[in-house]
Image: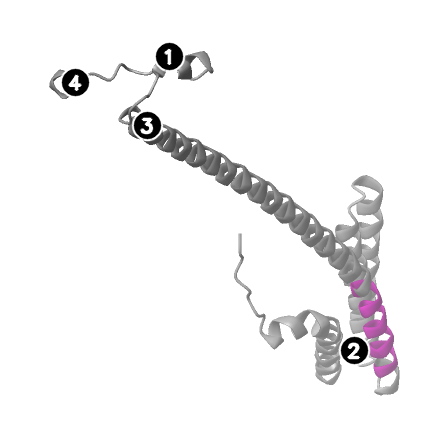
Amino acid sequence: MNEPIVARHWLAIAAPKAAPAIATTTVLALARIWNTNGAEHSVGNAVLMGSLSLGAAAAGVAAGNSTGDSVLVGTAFAASGALAFAGVAGYADGLSLPLLLWSLATAGAYGLAARYWRHDRRETVAYERQTSERREEYAHVERVETLRATTQIEVARTGSAYAEQLAQALVIRSTLPGFDPKALETAGLPELPSVGSPTQH
């Protein structure tokens, strides 16, 4: 019933929040490395990245029309944006445009991620609420059953003690002079065994 409490490491908590910024920064760094290695003002490289970006966007549109899977569509469009961003950052000769695109891409990535984070948070809260309600229901049932069993045990114990006391009282009363078992039977008590001499036992 009692579940162990597991404290998550701060890196495990911070990593999902930092992932969009890490992804866009990595793309920017790789694009600038590519820029210094011959991609600057290279029309062929720009056409290649533009084609890949358009292909990824077309794949996202096709996936949305055929399957309707939002995760697949989001992944395809994110790949399209990353390829376009890498192409521009690799083609441009200065840092102002790549940094502007990096800030826009990071903001967009956090906007998309926040949507999924809210969805996951809602599912987590709903699951925790259902688990808590189920746990409370089971605990209530367990408490009721415990009370019922305890009551039955107490009733049985009380009845047994009463029967023992009654039998003891009748045995003691039967040894006293003037005891009439017929009077007890007339009063509604069960028939008592006849009390004979000690030699009959």
The nearer-to-camera label among 2 and 1 is 1
Which amino acid lies under the numbered mark 3 shown in the image of this protein? Arg
Look at label 4 and name its amino acid. Ser
115 relative to 86, above or below: above
Q: Residues within 10 Å of mark 1 (few under 14, many from 20)?
A: few
Q: Measure the alpha-carbon separation of dots 2 and 3.
A: 112 Å
Segment colored magenta:
99-113
Measuring from the top left, give residue 9's x and y in whole percent. Answer: 58, 74
Image position of 27 (left or right of 1): right
Disc 2 + disc 4, Cβ < 8 Å: no
Q: Is residue 151 above or below residue 56?
A: above
Task: Give the alpha-carbon distance from disc 4 to disc 3, as whole Å.
Answer: 16 Å
In the picture of the structure, the residue carrying the numbered disc 4 is: 197
127 left or right of 45? left
Residue 106 sits in quarter: bottom right
Q: Amino acid at mark 1?
A: Lys
From the image, tell me which residue sits under label 1: 182
Q: Which comes sooner in the sequence, label 2 or label 4?
A: 2
**Could you say which quadrant of the image residue 169 lies in?**
top left
Q: Residue drawn at (85%, 78%), measured in percent from left and top?
A: 103
Residue corresponding to mark 2: 90
Which residue is labeled 3 in the image?
Answer: 173
Q: CA distance from mark 1 to mark 3?
A: 13 Å
Spot occupied by residue 84 in the image (x, y as percentages of width and height) = 82, 68
Q: Dot 2: few (<14), some (14–19), or many (≥20) neighbours within 10 Å?
A: many
